[in-house]
Structure formats: structure tokens, C-alpha cells
Image (tube, coloured by chain):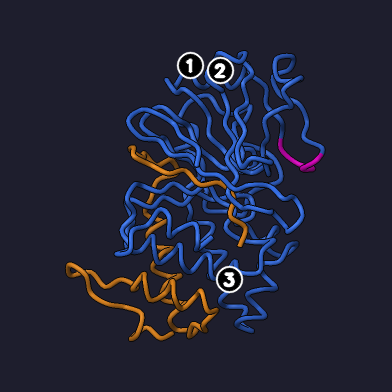
Chain colours: A orange, B blue
């Protein structure tokens, strides 16, 4: 999986295609390093800008441990 | 895990509800990389609707001691990728307030927790220490039902760190901050959840545990559960 294949633009925002990555991961497909680095850097930036405690409104599903 | 998602995410990939994850995405399974990549992609698509808190396994010490570091090095042969994961884990938020009713975190409360501002003021961008406030939020456990009304806090020998908490300190935090319950994860449950009904069978549980990894480690034969909160009501699925 490469950046060019994975990312598309939705409402002016460039994001990973969810359906594509889900299917790719289900068959344990490989992800190029460059692509994984981009995902990690982007998601780290999103977390970093969140506060320690977040407010969430219902409806909400709360999920406990997943462990790979 | 991804199968579970097909139930809560519609075919276009838009979550039908907000999703709040209480941490421990990695270790003890062989698809931690895949789980993380999928959840991160979900988060990047819906940053406000998908909330991912940090668990005690999202740390350098745990991923080195258990399986995640080895998994990443096997799949990528690259220390840099592992380091980026650690940076990512250190950036994850540590608690959530659902509807102003439920206080949520991975492990539980701390003797140092009085008000929501205590959580807001801690520096979370570090490897969790072996004791103290940040450690407790990620590591503490509720006491066994028979002890919960007798003690406020006790040592937590099974974890070799942090504390166990009883009814009184939980009640004080809930009352001071206007919450109904603490919702946390961190401990496997046969049914995938446990209502810690320390106030008696009629009372709403002060603490609720939710655990979503079915057949944990291939040996517990437990169910995985999630909690749905909608129209002020709570349902277990």
C-alpha cells in the first residue's frame, strides 16, 4: 500500500480510504514505510492537539481493551 | 477486531455513533500493527467522532516486555517505525467525559484525583511513571467487591504498581464532579463487562469495566463487550 493508492480527497481534506485499508489489512497486506510514516505523523499531530480530557456526546459506543 | 467494526461502522465508513476507545490496542495479539493502522485511519477520517485514549500498554516498557515491539521489528525491520509509534502513544489523551455523566479512562481513579482539572493539568507526553497520578489513571483497578466498602485505597500487588480503589473515593469524585459512574477497561471479564455494584444491587454501579477482546490471549474464553450510551440509557452489546 502506497500513499498514492491509499489517500484520496474528501471535502477538500486528504485522508486514507477506509474501505481500502480495511480490506488490505484483512489480507495482511504490506504497507510501504513511507505510507505508514505519514499515517503515524498525521495521527500523532491530531492527538497532540487534543486536551488530556475530551468531552464526548451521546450516542457513543465505548470500547475496552482490544489487544491486537 | 475489524469484524467488530463492521457492526458499528456503516459501509461508507462513517461511524453511526461517536466511538470512544479506552486504550490497549497493542500487545498480546499478532495483529497489533493492523489494528493500529485501521484505527488511526478511522481517526484521521473522523477526528472528532473517534476518540482514542491511552492504555497502559501504549508505552515503551509494556511494548518492549510484551509483543508489540517485536511485531513491528518483524514486520518492518525498522527501529524508526517503532519510535514513531511510541511518540504517537505519548500524544494520546488520557480521559474522557461522556455527556457530563461518565468519567472514562483506561485504569481508574487515583488518590491524587479530586477534580477534572487535576486530569487537565498533568503532563501526559511522557512514558508513564511507575507510580503517581498518570500511572494510576492507566493502571489502577477497582477492589474486589468484598473489600470495596471497607477500604479507600489498597496496594495493587498483581500489577506491581499503582493502587486498588474502593467505593468511598470513587463516590467522592463522582459527587464533586457531578458524574454518575466511572467507566474503565484494563481487566478481562468473562462476559466482557462488569458492573461493580458496591452500593447494593438496586444502586447504579459506581464503576463499570468494559473489555472488548474476546477469547483474550486464546485462553480466557471470555466474551468481548462494548457499551452503547444513547438517549440517556446504557446498553451492553
Q: Position of residue B42 (x, y in %)?
A: 39, 62
Which element is circle 3 on?
Answer: helix
Q: Chain of mark 3?
A: B
Does residue B161 show up magenta in the picture?
yes
Name the residue that disc number 3 marks. B83
> Residue at left 63%, top 50%?
B56
Q: Are marks 3 and 1 on the same chain?
A: yes
> Residue at left 44%, top 75%?
A23
Q: Are marks 3 and 2 on the same chain?
A: yes
Compared to B93, does B209 lie above or below? above
Compared to A9, does B54 lie above or below? above
Instruction: Mark 3 or mark 2: name the one nearer the start of the chain.
Output: 3
Numbered range of the magenta stretch: B158-162
Q: Residues within 10 Å of mark 3 (few under 14, many from 20)?
A: few
Which element is circle 2 on?
Answer: helix
Of tags 3 and 2, the one toward the viewer is 2
- 3D distance between C-alphas at marks 3 and 2: 39 Å
Q: Chain of mark 2?
A: B
Answer yes or no: do the residues labelled 1 and 2 have beta carbons within 8 Å? yes
Amino acid at each position: 500500500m502506497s500513499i498514492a493508492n491509499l489517500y484520496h480527497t474528501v471535502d477538500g481534506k486528504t485522508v486514507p480510504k477506509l474501505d481500502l485499508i480495511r480490506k488490505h489489512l484483512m489480507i495482511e497486506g504490506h504497507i510501504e514505510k513511507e505510507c505508514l510514516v505519514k499515517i503515524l505523523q498525521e495521527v500523532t499531530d491530531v492527538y497532540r492537539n487534543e486536551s488530556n480530557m475530551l468531552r464526548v456526546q451521546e450516542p457513543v459506543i465505548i470500547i475496552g481493551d482490544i489487544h491486537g | 477486531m475489524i469484524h467488530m467494526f463492521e457492526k458499528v461502522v456503516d459501509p461508507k465508513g462513517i461511524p453511526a455513533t461517536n466511538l470512544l476507545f479506552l486504550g490497549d490496542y497493542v500487545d498480546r495479539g499478532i495483529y497489533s500493527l493492523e489494528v493500529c493502522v485501521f484505527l488511526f485511519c478511522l481517526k484521521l477520517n473522523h477526528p472528532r467522532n473517534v476518540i482514542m485514549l491511552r492504555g497502559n500498554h501504549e508505552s515503551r516498557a509494556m511494548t518492549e516486555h510484551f509483543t508489540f515491539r517485536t511485531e513491528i521489528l518483524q514486520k518492518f525491520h525498522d527501529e524508526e517505525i517503532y519510535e514513531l509509534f511510541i511518540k504517537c502513544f505519548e500524544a494520546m489523551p488520557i480521559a474522557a467525559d461522556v455527556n457530563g455523566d461518565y468519567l472514562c479512562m483506561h485504569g481508574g481513579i487515583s488518590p491524587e484525583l479530586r477534580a477534572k482539572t487535576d486530569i487537565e493539568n498533568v503532563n501526559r507526553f511522557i512514558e508513564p511513571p511507575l507510580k503517581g497520578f498518570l500511572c494510576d489513571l492507566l493502571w489502577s483497578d477497582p477492589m474486589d467487591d468484598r473489600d470495596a466498602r471497607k477500604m479507600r485505597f489498597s496496594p495493587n500487588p498483581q500489577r506491581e504498581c499503582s493502587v486498588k480503589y474502593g467505593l468511598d473515593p470513587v463516590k467522592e469524585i463522582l459527587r464533586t464532579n457531578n458524574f454518575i459512574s466511572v467507566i474503565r477497561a484494563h481487566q478481562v471479564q468473562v462476559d466482557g463487562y462488569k458492573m461493580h455494584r458496591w452500593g447494593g444491587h438496586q444502586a447504579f454501579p459506581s464503576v463499570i469495566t468494559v473489555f472488548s477482546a474476546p477469547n483474550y490471549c486464546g485462553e480466557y474464553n471470555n466474551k468481548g463487550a462494548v457499551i452503547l450510551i444513547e438517549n440517556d440509557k446504557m446498553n451492553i452489546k
